[in-house]
Amino acid sequence: MPADETDAPGGVRAFARALAPTPAPAGLPGLVLRSRTAGTRRPPTARGGPARRTPGARPPGGRRLRRLYERARRTWDRPLTAYYLILGGSLLITVLGLVMVYSASMITALKYSLPGSYFFRKQFLAAVIGAGLLLLASRMPPKLHRALSYPLLVGTVFLMVLVQVPGIGHAVNGNQNWIYLGGPFQLQPSEFGKLALILWGADLLARKQDKRLLTQWKHMLVPLVPVAFLLLGLIMLGGDMGTAIILTAILFGLLWLAGAPTRLFAGVLAVAAVLGAILIKTSPNRMSRLGCVLAGDPGPDDTCWQAVHGIYALASGGWFGSGLGASVEKWGQLPEPHTDFIFAITGEELGLAGTLSVLALFAALGYAGIRVAGRTEDPFVRYAAGGVTTWITAQAVVNIGAVLGLLPIAGVPLPLFSYGGSALLPTMFAIGLLIAFAREEPGAKAALAMRQSGFGRKRAGVSWKSMRRRVKKRPSGER
């Protein structure tokens, strides 16, 4: 190509110089002026450098999970968490128990020529009375609970002695532990013995702790263990070993909370185990129940009929059950479907989802009780809350373990769930105790007062956050 054509104003070299980027002015190092034809994309971020997040983009998954965890932990650590868990969990268990009692007891009532809602109406009446006891116990101060402990213990022992008097006591399923009150109502004093032992034992241990006497083993055992053995003896005279097991668990729970040394705790446990082995060995009925653990068939004489059919009921429920009222095992196949084995009917009609829901409610109740016992500075509250939690969780484990075939059938009801007013009334009073103690947690009183005052301000038209009175908007131009 000729030189004059390349150097001309319209030549190739002139056109290339026009496309080249303009150099930076002197004194401004690093500043580059791009032409219109140059690219506008920024260079990629160097490795290891901070990455810029686009506005509106979501944070990484790990960070989001971390934030959710921190939010859940803060919510879980609020002062009123235990209060709401106890109140809500106990009410849900009771309401679901009423529904299942009606469903499980209908066929049994018709079998005895009674109305289909006979057992449900009795349980509903007991629940109403129990709700009154729960409200009363939740409003009583700890001093009044402590004052109630001795009269309750004396009255319970007196009633348990009356059970053994011929003509007054009544036997049910081979166990003489009932007193007729007239008409269809009867009372089982041993159920109130659990509550009496907890209140009296908590008051006793709290007074000894205040005097610094629990460091001596004789003050830790006497008179707690002798009085507990008295109650156990009266219960075993009637043949009710299931209630005796729960009472023993309560005794061990109180000793554990009192800080009993390992040797002392092991000694009491060894004595209880020897006595229990003797009582089981000398009773053919108890030996047969022990032999039904993990049984897969009813046996030659149908010895394990109840245990095996409880497993059948759970297995036929599947994931979501056959539906309320659609149980097959309650039609005469499974004994005690509305009392000791109501959990099996729940599994058959509500499936695995229903049984896991019941287990979750009991787990939440147990956690809340442990939290109340661990956060208080009052020794009486700690022992009483720990004793009630031990009672409810141990009885739930024994009942559910028997239905699953993992434990011998002990004949104890599922707390707040099974049919039985004598078991429901003291249990709901004990739940009221936990609610009263949860209200005494650090920060709980202030939180409840703020909730109540905030509710009053909202009703008066005051905003919770700004504390300013809400005023209706006026038309434009109006002063």
Image: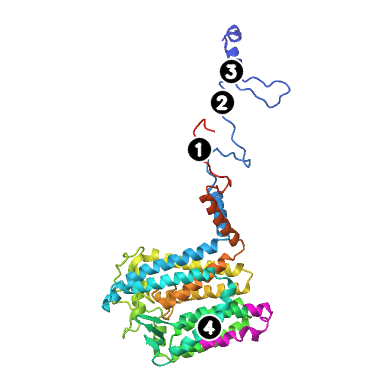
Bounds of the magenta segment:
206-231
Q: Nearer the viewer, residue 86 or 29?
A: 86
Q: Are marks 2 and 4 in contact (CB under 8 Å)?
A: no
Q: Separation of disc 3 and disc 1 at Cα?
A: 64 Å
Q: Secondary structure at mark 1?
A: loop
Q: Residue 39 — which label?
A: 2
Q: Which residue appears at 58% of the width and 47% of the height?
A: 467
Q: Separation of disc 2 and disc 4 at Cα?
A: 91 Å
- Locate residue 127: give its quadrant: bottom left
Which residue corresponds to mark 3?
19
Q: Secondary structure at mark 4?
A: helix
In the rendered image, the vertical position of residue 61 relative to residue 164, given as above or below: above
Q: Separation of disc 1 and disc 2 at Cα?
A: 55 Å
- Locate residue 40: give its quadrant: top right
**Quadrant for the N terminus in the image:** top right
Which residue corresponds to mark 1?
473
Residue 406 in view, yes or no: no
Amino acid on which disc 3 is placed: Leu
